[in-house]
Amino acid sequence: MVKLTINNIKCRFKVELPINYKNKIKSLADFVSIRQTGNIVILRTETAVYIVFSACFVNVTGIKSIDQIQTAIEEFLYLFELKDQNIPFIIDNISAHTKIDQTNYDYNITDYANRLTIRYNGLILRNNLKFPSISVLLSQGTIVLFRSGKINCVGIKTISDICYFE
């Protein structure tokens, strides 16, 4: 395939927040965008978006590279004045995109999807009434092909899976 560009990485981690973490969140209002809904607090910084659940689970999104994950976790620890610690994280989803230059060769979305399905042992899904594309489900993620030549890859869990698509 071609080189993919990462759009977004969504990961999660668990951290023990101080008992008064809601007061700390209020004090951050001058530095970050804050939205609160029930037991969920959303903090938006220039680095990432943090979705904080009252059970001390944190989802992080808006990250553009694997290297930024650790930076985002360190920023979160800094915001809550937590000591530096080695926080394990889990990548839930990587989404990436590319575009095929259709001027160089004849691009037929159906033929391309069929070739991908055979090559990677995938499954084709079509629902052109709701979404004008062809999706190819693979064990490493889903490839969404558009007639314009744009290709989105979603549901990727590791960097090696991105390399699998390239």
Image (cartoon, helix red, strand yellow):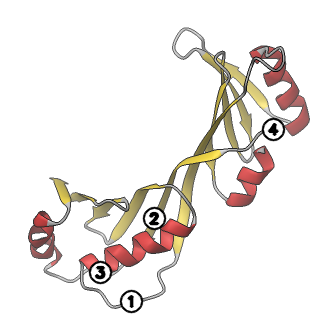
Q: Residue at x 32, y 72 (%)?
A: 56
Q: CA distance from mark 2 to mark 3?
A: 17 Å
Disc 1 to disc 3: CB gap under 8 Å: no
Q: Which residue is mark 1?
A: 84
Q: Earlier in the sequence, mark 3 or mark 4?
A: 4
Q: Which residue is mark 2?
A: 12
Examine the rendering and report whether any part of residue 165 can be seen: yes
Three-letter residue code for mark 3: Tyr
User: How far across and how far down the image is residue 93, in percent?
Assistant: 56, 52
Q: Which residue is mark 4?
A: 1
Examine the rendering and report whether any part of residue 38 can be seen: no
Q: CA distance from mark 2 to mark 4?
A: 29 Å
Q: CA distance from mark 3 to mark 4?
A: 40 Å
- Tell me the mark number nearer the camera, choosing from 2 and 3: 3
Q: CA distance from mark 1 to mark 3?
A: 8 Å
Q: Earlier in the sequence, mark 2 or mark 3?
A: 2
Give the camera-side residue of 134 and 7.
7
User: How far across and how far down the image is residue 20, in percent?
Assistant: 13, 80
